[in-house]
Amino acid sequence: MEPSARTELFDVVIVGGGLAGLTQGIALASHGMSVAIIDREDPARVLRAGFDGRVSAIALASQRMLEAIGLWRHVREAQPMWDIRVSDGDSLLFLHYDHRDLGDAPFGYMVENRIMRQAQQDALAELPGAQLIAPMTVAKVDRGLPGSGAPAQLTLADGRQLRARLVIGADGRQSAMREQAGIRTTTWSYDQTGIVCTVAHELPHEGAAQERFLPAGPFAILPMTDDENGVHRSSLVWTEPTERAATIMGLDDADFQAEMRRRFGDGYGEAHVVGPRWSYPLTFLHAERYTDHRLALIGDAAHGIHPIAGQGLNLGLRDIAALTEALVEARRLGLDPGQADVLERYARWRRTDTLVLSAVTDGLTRLFSNDIAPLRIARDLGLGVVERLPPLKKLFMRHAMGDLGTLPRLLRGERL
Ligand SMILES: Cc1cc2nc3c(=O)[nH]c(=O)nc-3n(C[C@H](O)[C@H](O)[C@H](O)COP(=O)(O)OP(=O)(O)OC[C@H]3O[C@@H](n4cnc5c(N)ncnc54)[C@H](O)[C@@H]3O)c2cc1C
């Protein structure tokens, strides 16, 4: 079938309806833009308990945006993060961020990815301007030539044709949209794997997130909401060298539990693993450009970082805030949302933030994932210095909240 003027025309077609793609769709549709989101996964499957066991730290600024676009009110459960404690192995020097040093607000919220996906589907269902087309893939994209003014043409796997003024690539680290545009990436593997599981424990976590730097890699204990029976729970992101992680993942329940217990410590009383375990190979990725003709990349399609600081999705949410502002303002001025200068504004806004955070998380991963004595001394001194210098500590705390730099309006909680 030849595309024709009768083929449905959207302001934006988003390829990839993961956590970033769906949020982007909601942000645009809640500001009156017409959006189609295409994802290869079945929407019912992504809500199942076994699909994704991760719990994401949503920084305060990101949460303000989710509130402003009408998504947050659909999030059924969220655990406020009141404290963050960072320690290096069994060193006595540690860093303690207490939200009270900055005010009343928490650093952010821990939300199960499964609950966020459900909230996204519920929010989308209320937005007439947005459609989720899934499970579906894109067979062909023709973004045309710069200067022609013609919209992009997308052919879906079932033969359906869509036209869009802008295509957003939110299709993750293996992004086909990025590849099709010939955008190169810088990529490397950390030779580390993140093991994720839920631990039920006797004593309450009091909303504290713990990051322990062990020689094998960071071991994070992240507070979750209590379960329906009032059982206290935390999510583990337990990093190990890839080979060792494979061995640990292969252990039977009793041995896995024993390995977990050796690292978890006694601070939470009796503790045991509940439910399945997941593992994620950890890699770094940065796209050389975030835009091309009628194309913008967001989320992991543009940049993938180590989960050491729980910032990967937050970076994607900051992309969404900046891109939504650029697109909504362009439309108000009667501009084509896919035109080069609109996309350039987005790319310029995001580049420094993503590059700096990518470099910092990469540096931290390398600095802390070892037991080399001089490095251990240097990093322990570093933690001690930050702990004792209130202005520096406050700067880091604001960073954890996502509250630094020139924030797009959505991250300040304002509608556009
Ligand atoms: C262990 C771990 C813990 C983490 N913890 C945190 C945290 O606490 N806080 C935080 O901010 N970040 C965290 N992150 C990072 C965060 O999970 C990711 O940055 C985020 O999920 C990326 O979302 P995305 O939508 O950009 O990409 P993805 O989740 O990869 O989604 C891409 C989507 O595109 C779809 N897709 C792909 N190809 C196609 C195609 N050809 N056609 C149609 N659809 C397609 C896929 O089905 C998928 O739905 C963590 C990561 C890991 C590994």
Image (cartoon, rainbow, N blue to C red):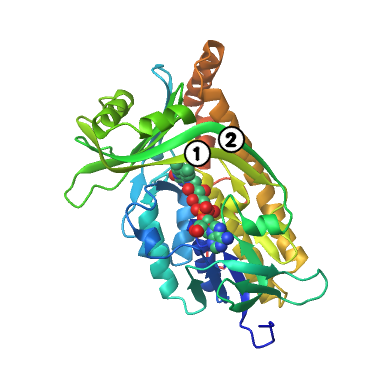
Observer able to see residue 391: no
Quarter-of-image position of residue 120:
bottom left
Location of the C terminus by quadrant is bottom right
In this picture, residue 67 sits left or right of residue 286: left
| Label 1: element kind | strand
In this picture, residue 110 sits left or right of residue 62: left
User: Who's the residue at 36% across and 60% down the image?
Assistant: 47
Q: Which residue is mark 1?
A: 281
User: Who's the residue at 69% across and 85% down the image?
Assistant: 4
Q: Residue furthest right?
A: 147
- The number of discs equals 2
Q: CA distance from mark 2 to mark 1?
A: 8 Å
As shown in the figure, which amino acid type bears the numbered disc 2?
Answer: Ser
Location of the N terminus by quadrant is bottom right
Q: Residue furthest left?
A: 229
Q: Are marks 2 and 1 in contact (CB under 8 Å)?
A: yes
User: Who's the residue at 18% across and 47% down the image?
Assistant: 230
Give coordinates of residue 414: x percent, y percent: 52, 63
Who is closer to the viewer here, 411 or 180?
180
Does residue 134 lie above or below 284 as drawn?
below
